Every structure is written in C-alpha cells, then in structure tokens.
Image (cartoon, helix red, strand yellow):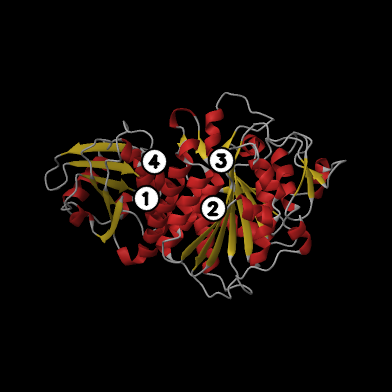
Amino acid sequence: MDFELKSLSPEQAASMAADALLVLVPDNLSATPLAGALATLTSEAASKGDLEAGLGKTLSCYRVPGIKARRVVLVRAGDGSGSAVRKAVAAGLASLKQPNIKKLGLVLSLLDHNSGAVRAAVQACADASYTYTTTKPSAKARALQAVVVAVADAPAVQAAFEAGKAMVTGVEFAKEWANRPANHATPSMLAEAARKLGRKPGIKTEVLGPKEVAALGMGAFMSVARGSVEPLRFIVMHYTGAAKSSAPVVLVGKGITFDTGGISIKPAAEMDEMKFDMGGAASVLGTFAALAELQPAINVVGLIPSCENMPDGQAVKPGDVVTSMSGQTIEILNTDAEGRLILCDALTYAARFKPRSVVDIATLTGACVIALGAVRSGLFSAHDDIATALQQAGESAMDPCWRMPLDDEYAEGLKSNFADMGNVAGRAGGSITAAKFLQKFTADLPWAHLDIAGTAWKSGAAKGSTGRPVPLLLQYLLDEAARPAAVPSTEPKKASKRARKA
C-alpha cells in the first residue's frame, strides 16, 4: 500500500481526488477555526447530533456538494491521541470495505499537531485493510491501494509518518511469514526470506546448516530438530547503520516453524495454530525489513534458530540429557518446552558480538497467556535500564509489554539430579521459570526476554498473526539510535574452549 503525506486544510482536502474521505473529528472541534464545504459538513453534523459523541462513532455521507470524493465518512476521534486515532480509523474503515475504494483521503487536519496520531493512523489503515492471500487464491486481495494523509503541517510530522510506514512494512512482513502454513514456511524457506532481505541496503545475511551448527556445539538446538525431516537453519543477519566500532543490539527470535510438542505431544485441538510458533522469528525478520526502510544509525544483529519439533523415531525423549553450546547440560523433562532449548544456544552465540543489549523474542509459554492475556507481552530482565527502555518503546508504539519478576527462588524447580538443569519446572509461574532457564545462558549479557505467546496471533474467527512485537522492537531500536553510541566492536569473538568442545 502506498502512503503519501500532504499539508492540506479541510477546505483543500475537500478538493482531493479520492474515492472516499475519512475525516477524523476531535472532541474539541469547536476550538478549531473552520471554512469550506468539508468543515461546514463536519461542524453541522456534530452540532445537530447526527455525528454522535463517543470515540469511533461514524456518519457516512454520499455525494456531498462541494466535496470531490464520492463518499465521506466522519468519525469521532476523541482526544486525538494515538490510541484514540487508531480506534477511530479502524471504525471508519469498517464502513469503507467496498472493493471500489482504492484511493483514500485520510483527513487529520482537524486534530492538534500529534506525531503519535499520524503514526497510529498509518498503522491502523494498513491493519484494517490487510488480507492474507498466499495460499488462498479465492481471497480477495486488498482493495485499498493508496492513502493520502492530510495534516495541518506535514514537515512537523514527517519523521513520525516515515516511522509509521516502516512499521507497516515490518508488521506485514511478519504477518505474511507467521500466517503461512508450516509446509509453506519451513526453516529453509524462512532462511530464503532472510537471504532476500539481505539484498536490501545495509543488511547482510548468513545461513548456517546442520554441519555448521554441529561444529558450534549447539547440542540443545540440534536436539529439537532431530525428529524432523526438515533440516534446521541458523539465520544470522546484520544491519549496519552506524560505525563498525559501535556495539550492536542483538535480537534473537524463536523460529519453531511447527510445534507438535515432540514426544510430549500436544492435544490435537488447535494444534494447527502451532504454525505461529515462529512468531519471534517473524518479528525479527519484520524488524529488519523496517530497518531497511528507515536506515537508522544503529547496528543490529538478528539471530534466528529455526527448526520443526516433530515426534519421529529419532526425536529427543523425555529424560534425555543434551549439552548446550555453553557447555551446560540439560535434562529434557518435557519435549514440548523446546523453544528455550533452541534459544539458549542462540543466546550463547550472541555473546560473541559484545552487544549493547540482547533481546530474545519467543512464543514461549502458555503460562504467559494466562498471566497477561492478549493485551501485553511478558517482559523479563534483570537490567532496569533495558526493561525501562523496552516498556517505554512499547507504550510509544502502542505495542505494550509488562515487566515480570525474575527472583532467584523461581529457578529452584529447574534443578536436576542428572544434568546441570532441567528444561522445565512445575506449573506454577511457568513463564517466569522459562525465563529463569534462559537467564542461565546470558551470564553477563545485558539481556531481556519477551514472551509473546499471548500477543503474536489471534484465534477464532479473526485467526491470524498480529505482527507484534515489530512496533515495539523498531521503536526500541530508534530510541537506542538516538542515544550515545555504545562500546567496542561488532566483530565476533571466538567461542570459549568449553563451547567449542561441547
């Protein structure tokens, strides 16, 4: 979808050549000086009560004299904040679903200057019109092709507009790959998508296969892949937007392209949704797609361990002990706790980049869904500065997370009689004990973990990927780019002797 930003008054917007105008009307409309046909329509509809008060209330009009567009939809935008605008645009576009609406004029000129509102409006337009078609030929492709965003002062919100467009690119890339069925999104296919991103400016991609992963000693990762005929892939991506001496942010995305649970097999009901278990990987790919658009001054490394978790004769069994890249041994008590097994080796690998921060993103635990539902992702970190930065980025991007505890006592259940640790504890505090497991592989890393099991996709009639937490991650990176450059080099350091022998 094409977005264009223009400085247009309501009077000028009335002359816009578009199939429809969507006009956002704030609560404080009376404080705004108005002139022209569109302004008259808006003020009269509001004053006469035809446009009801209340966020998201709409009034549809057809062939209004003095307005060039055939259709005009007025929608209440509350206080004009980002969250209000997102709801208002969604409500307005719900009444503009016709296939002949190909070009939309989105009129924000009545709102106060608000960068968050512009970005929210762009994202809401894309979200409301998104359609998945890759494996569904009967699906009608997105009708809306172009959106002209009319504001009072375009230069003042240009940066927010560009960020909004990049977020749309990233979110839709993530949605595409998470929505694909597992036979259309194998680890090899995911790696090919990463390779294609590697052709974009500033991005380089390297893909490691089973032999290279074995040479690294990634025994935990390899154990999960054993039951599948699909070969594992370890995707390493670099975005270079700053000096090579500037330490990178490392994003680690869980890439389980399908999760049966392995020998600890899942119930059949809704197992199809386990194609979304690579939502963390999809969010890393989407974030890199957005970085290619925006080109911020920061270095970023993306690590995606990707495989299937299947239950064949070679699959890892409950009670098996494997050796991770760190040299620590793990008793696999439940093969359905596989995400942490592939992530732990990727986290050990991340240390070689001497990162300014490491954030892993994973659809890790059903326990996080119970704790936080589908509203906020779970955030775990022992580093207050990273946790605060991620929380602030989530609020700014309207992709919120919530910090959870990491008390040492939660790790007690991970003790094993036969290995350095088990891969699961009891049911209580399951999302926390999973994070405590990952923490054992972060040593002195400035690390945070995002559990997106509740936010990465929707079930039911609206089943599909949300593309979260691409907005949060991109905003975090933009905020980091605005901070002073960090420490030494992006050059990998050699793995420890212990890790090489593992």
Q: Residue at x 68, y 56 (%)?
A: 215
**Percent position of residue 313, x then y:** 67, 31
In terms of sequence position, does the residue under pointer 4 or pointer 1 come before the other?
A: 4
Q: CA distance from mark 2 to mark 3?
A: 35 Å
Q: Which residue is mark 1?
A: 121
84 lies above or below 49: below
Amino acid under disc 2? Gly
In terms of sequence position, does the residue under pointer 2 or pointer 4 come before the other?
A: 4
Amino acid under disc 3? Glu
**Percent position of residue 296, x then y:** 46, 67
Q: Which residue is mark 2?
A: 394
Q: Residue at x 58, y 38 (%)?
A: 229
Q: Which residue is mark 4?
A: 55
Amino acid under disc 1? Ala
Q: Is residue 405 something that shows in the picture? A: no
Query: Which residue, as the protein is rendered here, is positioned at the far front?
Result: 211
Q: Are marks 4 and 3 in contact (CB under 8 Å)?
A: no
In terms of sequence position, does the residue under pointer 4 or pointer 3 come before the other?
A: 4
Q: CA distance from mark 1 to mark 2?
A: 17 Å
Q: Are marks 1 and 2 in contact (CB under 8 Å)?
A: no
Amino acid under disc 4? Leu
Q: Nearer the viewer, mark 2 or mark 3?
A: 3
Q: Are marks 4 and 1 in contact (CB under 8 Å)?
A: no
Residue 218 versus residue 102: which sits nearer the camera? 218
**Percent position of residue 214, x then y:** 67, 52
Label 1 secondary element = helix
Q: Is residue 120 left or right of residue 44?
A: right
Q: Is residue 260 left or right of residue 427?
A: left
Label 3 secondary element = loop
